Structures are given as C-alpha cells and as structure tokens.
Image: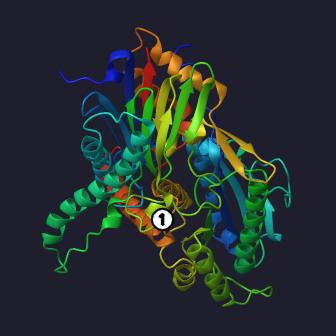
C-alpha cells in the first residue's frame, strides 16, 4: 500500500455535511473533499464548495477536488528539495489546478451539449459548475497551498497555537462577489504559496459554512472586520489527536444543533493532526 | 475535551426579514385581520424550529392602515410606533394587530425601505454582516390608496425603486395578496415573486414567506434576484405537490 510521510506520523480526518438550508429543501450537499497520497510520499488535502445558485454546483465541486488531485499528481511526482523548488512547484500547482478543472468541465459539458432538448440546443454552461477550491500538498515541514474563493486554512503550531493562515474574504455585507473556479477573473483571486514550518502540528481546511462557527471577528481601527482563529480552535486538533477518538465524531459534530445554528450552509472540514 | 464540548461560535451575520402588513379597514370588514393575527402567532411558533434562523434572524413589522404607517414592535413589548423596528427573531412574539383606515401601501413600502436601510447601516457600523440578502414581504388584501381612500398608481414609482435595489443585490421583494388584492399591483411590484390567493388563508401566505426565506438561504449570496425568485417558485411548487399528496393520504391537518 502506498503511503505518505504524513501518514506515518499524522492522522487525517474529514467530514462533509449538508447544511440545514439545503437539507430542508432536499438539496444535496454541494461541498466535496478529497485526501490521499500524491507522488512519492506526499499527501493531498482538498475541499471545494459548490455555488448554491448553480444547477451543477455539486458536480463542479467534485471536479474541483479531482482537478486538485490530477494537478498534484502531475506537479509533485517527487517532493521538491529546496524552498525555491517548492515555491516554483506551488505556482505550477495553482496553474495546473485551474487547467485540469477547465479540462474536466469541458469533458463534462460535451455530452451535456450533445443531449437534445425541447428547444433543440442545450445551453449548459461552465458557470453552472461554479465552485471554490482550497487544496494543500503536504510533506512536512513543507506545505504548498492553492485557494480560489472563500475556503479558509488554519494551522496549529506547537508552541504558538492556531493561526488563520488563509482567511476567507471578510465584510460580507459589502463583499464583492465570490470568485469561483469558473469565474472570468479567477486569476486575480488565486492565492498560492508555501508554508515551511517544523512546528506545525495541525492543519484544518474548511469551507465557508464554518466561518461563523469557528472563527472570531474583530473590528480594526480602519473599520474593517478581520477574522482570526480563536485560541480554543486548538481544541479541535487536540480532540482528534487523542487516541481512541473515532473520526466519524467530526461528522457528528458538524451536524450538531450548535453548528446548524451557526450557519445554514453546507460544512466541510479536513483535519490533519500530528499524533 | 470531549467532542460535544468543542467550542462553536454563534452566527455573527444577520438575516433581515421585514413584513409589510395591511391593517386597513377592509381587513376588519372581512374578518381577515383575525385570521392574520392567528396565522402570525402560529408562524412564530413554527419559526422556533429553525435553529439557524433563530440565531441570525431579525424581524420588523411595518403596518399600513390603522394609525397610517408605523413600525410595530415584533416582540409585542412596545405599543404604537417603535423606535427599534427590528428585534431578534428569538424575541418575536407578534402583537395583536387592529385594522382601520385607508391603504397607504406605497408609503409603507417606502418606510420599510427606510428602516431597512437604517438597520443595515447600524449593523455595518457594528461590523456585523448579512447572512443573506434582506427580504421584504408585502401582505395585503387591497389596493394602494391616497389619504382620501382613492386608488393611486404611485406604486409604479416604488416598483422602479425596488427593481434598482434588486439589481444591486440589496433586496428581495415579495408581494403576497389574499382575496381583494389586485393582481396588476402585486405583479407590478414583484414581477417574479407575487402570489394572489383566492381566499384569506394567511397561514398559506406565511408559509410562502417561510419558503422564500428557505429559497434565499439555499441560493448563493451572490445570486441575481431573479435566480432566487425562480428557486422560490420551484420550491413552492414542490411543497404544494408534497402537501397535496399528503392531503390525499390524509396525513395533513390544516388546523
């Protein structure tokens, strides 16, 4: 069985649940996630959030995490050796995620457009697959990430606690439109890079349905709202680091009344904790 | 720490619901005001089952007719025009409405837009965002009138203003009429989101309000208003079909 260096000393737990808003009207969970070994000993963690307004959003989010897997396989057949190589690889990883996503969407569209409709032409469009993406390729102490949209990434350092490494866009009352993998201006919103830190002991990738439930907001002197990971975010890493805690408990937690009350959105979290 | 004890924060963002309610004399003549009061009380109880909405929701009630146009306190604590139109949904305890006078519907919609704008600004100043686009629901059994009770077409100006708010993704507007309301006015005010019932079943009207809230929540925050209205119409058809099926099976008690 192929394993990664993350597998040897870490534990990966993931859960994705439909939000009460979707569940109440019978709409499927439009989030997706994917984790697994990449190349020779690296590990991919990926989540995606399909746009609720689009009819093929759930399909789009699956294609988004599939694209991250394809891109990671292509860019990281072996681990980069230096920080410069990691940086270059993260750039290529971001570009490959977009390219593979476009390719997968095109392949999904071809049969749809060939399907006859009452009006003669099937107008299925790329925008119907609108989705975000947050993906991370880990080979501790190196972590290459790519993000389009409003997912967020928290990393725990010991010592140091939890930090919101990649925040979602804030100020939703006036926020510009969410940028999706299908958006024309997605390159402007594309965030990618490398974290190098030997003290990282926990990683959490989350979709925007968890923003209210997990993050604190503070108002800065400039009037803007800034999000941060609260001190007690560490408890999530600690809880699933503890021996004997079943990974399915994360799913149960995300389905709890507390989380349901915090947001009606779908909720997805991928946790990786150093044992 | 056990999994159950892991910390979860409460929703920071708000969902603003504004009911614009007809309390003109026609509501008394037909007994509709009593039906509306009953339906509001039942709806209030139903809403308590929606955890997410209870935590994020704020509601305002603008009435038109009795005492002209006013914001009544949705928690029932303040009588007359309240200086604080929006209250948390968990404090919603609808007061008994009374009916009288003409139908200043146009002024009521304008007032609703004003109080909504003030609340948005207050929340923004506090650093609180909106979970979903604000919604205004007009509920009426009549047609808009001037101060003398004569029918007025000034609603057309308000309709243009509503379209601007919708295009800017600042608002969703629903026009819900019962017997006596005018189809041309309802469809003019909310071309994609109007309903005219043949009776005065306000429970059904408030079910439409609930459905519209669910449709808005299920859509992306960035979706154009028309997309959300289409979603609302789909959800409503689906629920109607489900309800009819359950009624055939004898599983629904309308009381």
Q: Which quadrant holds residue A229?
A: top right
Say what secondary structure mark 1 lies in: loop
In this rendered view, identify the residue nearer to me: A241 or B242.
A241
Residue B34 image offset from top left, x and y in percent: 66, 59
Please give the residue where the numbered disc 1 appears in the rendered image: B223
Picture layout, residue B2 above or below residue A265: above
Q: Does any portion of residue B103 appear in the rendered image?
A: no
Q: Please report the residue visible at 31 percent of the width from the left and 30 percent of the height from the top.
A: A42
Residue B241 image offset from top left, x and y in percent: 32, 58
Q: Please report the residue visible at 43 percent of the width from the left and 44 percent of the height from the top.
A: A87
Q: Please report the residue visible at 45 percent of the width from the left and 27 percent of the height from the top.
A: A141
Q: Is residue A100 left or right of residue A156?
A: left
Is the residue marked by circle 1 packed among few (<14), some (14-19), or many (20+) residues within 10 Å?
Answer: some
Q: Does any portion of residue A224 appear in the rendered image?
A: yes
Residue A5 image offset from top left, x and y in percent: 33, 22
Q: Please report the residue visible at 41 percent of the width from the left and 35 percent of the height from the top.
A: A82
Count numbered badges in the picture: 1
Picture layout, residue A29 above or below residue B33: above
Picture layout, residue A110 above or below residue A40: below
Quadrant housing the N terminus of chain B: top right
Q: Residue furthest top?
A: A243
Q: Is residue A111 left or right of residue B25?
A: left
Chain letter of mark 1 equals B
Q: Is residue A178 left or right of residue B23?
A: left
Q: Which quadrant holds residue A230?
A: top right
Picture layout, residue A242 above or below residue A251: above
Residue B153 image offset from top left, x and y in percent: 66, 91
In this rendered view, identify the residue nearer to me: B91 or A156.
A156
State how the image is colored: rainbow
């Amino acid at each position: 069985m192929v394993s990664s260096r993350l597998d040897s000393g870490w534990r990966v737990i993931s859960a994705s649940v439909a939000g009460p808003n979707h569940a109440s009207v019978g709409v499927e969970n439009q989030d997706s996630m994917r984790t697994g070994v990449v190349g020779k000993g690296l590990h991919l963690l990926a989540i995606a959030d399909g746009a609720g307004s689009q009819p093929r959003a759930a399909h789009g989010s699956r294609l988004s995490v599939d694209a991250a897997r394809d891109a990671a396989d292509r860019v990281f057949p072996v681990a980069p050796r230096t920080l410069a190589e990691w940086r270059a690889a993260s750039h290529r990883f971001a570009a490959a995620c977009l390219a593979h996503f476009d390719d997968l969407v095109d392949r999904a569209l071809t049969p749809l457009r060939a399907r006859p409709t009452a009006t003669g032409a099937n107008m299925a469009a790329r925008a119907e697959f609108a989705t975000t993406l947050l993906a991370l390729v880990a080979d501790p102490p190196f972590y290459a990430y790519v993000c389009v949209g409003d997912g967020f990434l928290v990393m725990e350092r010991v010592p140091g606690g939890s930090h919101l490494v990649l925040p979602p866009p804030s100020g939703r009352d006036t926020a510009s439109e969410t940028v999706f993998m299908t958006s024309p201006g997605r390159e402007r919103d594309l965030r990618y890079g490398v974290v190098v830190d030997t003290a990282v002991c926990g990683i959490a990738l989350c979709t925007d349905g968890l923003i209210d439930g997990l993050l604190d907001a503070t108002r800065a002197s400039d009037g803007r709202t800034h999000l941060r990971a609260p001190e007690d975010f560490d408890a999530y890493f600690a809880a699933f680091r503890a021996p004997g805690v079943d990974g399915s408990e994360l799913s149960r937690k995300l389905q709890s009344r507390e989380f349901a009350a915090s947001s009606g959105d779908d909720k997805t979290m991928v946790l990786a904790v150093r044992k | 720490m056990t999994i159950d004890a892991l910390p979860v924060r409460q929703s920071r963002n708000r969902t603003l619901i504004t009911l614009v309610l007809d309390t003109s004399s026609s509501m008394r003549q037909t007994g509709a005001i009593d039906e509306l009061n009953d339906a509001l009380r039942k709806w209030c109880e139903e809403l308590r089952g929606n955890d997410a909405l209870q935590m994020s929701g704020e509601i305002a009630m603008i009435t038109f007719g009795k005492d002209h146009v006013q914001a009544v306190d949705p928690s029932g604590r303040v009588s007359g025009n309240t200086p604080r139109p929006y209250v948390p949904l968990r404090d919603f305890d609808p007061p008994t409405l009374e009916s009288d006078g003409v139908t200043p519907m146009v002024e009521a919609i304008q007032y609703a837009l004003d109080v909504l704008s003030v609340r948005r600004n207050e929340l923004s100043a506090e650093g609180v965002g909106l979970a979903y686009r604000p919604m205004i629901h007009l509920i009426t059994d009549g047609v808009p009138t001037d101060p003398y009770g004569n029918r007025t077409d000034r609603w057309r100006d308000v309709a243009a203003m509503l379209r601007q708010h919708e295009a800017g993704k600042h608002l969703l507007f629903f026009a819900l009429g019962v017997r006596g309301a005018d189809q041309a006015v309802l469809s003019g005010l909310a071309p994609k989101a109007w309903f005219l019932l043949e009776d005065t079943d306000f429970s059904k009207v408030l079910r439409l309000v609930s459905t519209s809230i669910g449709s808005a929540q299920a859509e992306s925050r960035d979706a154009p208003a028309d997309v959300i209205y289409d979603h609302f119409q789909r959800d409503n058809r689906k629920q109607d079909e489900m309800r009819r099926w359950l009624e055939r099976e004898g599983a629904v008690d309308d009381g």
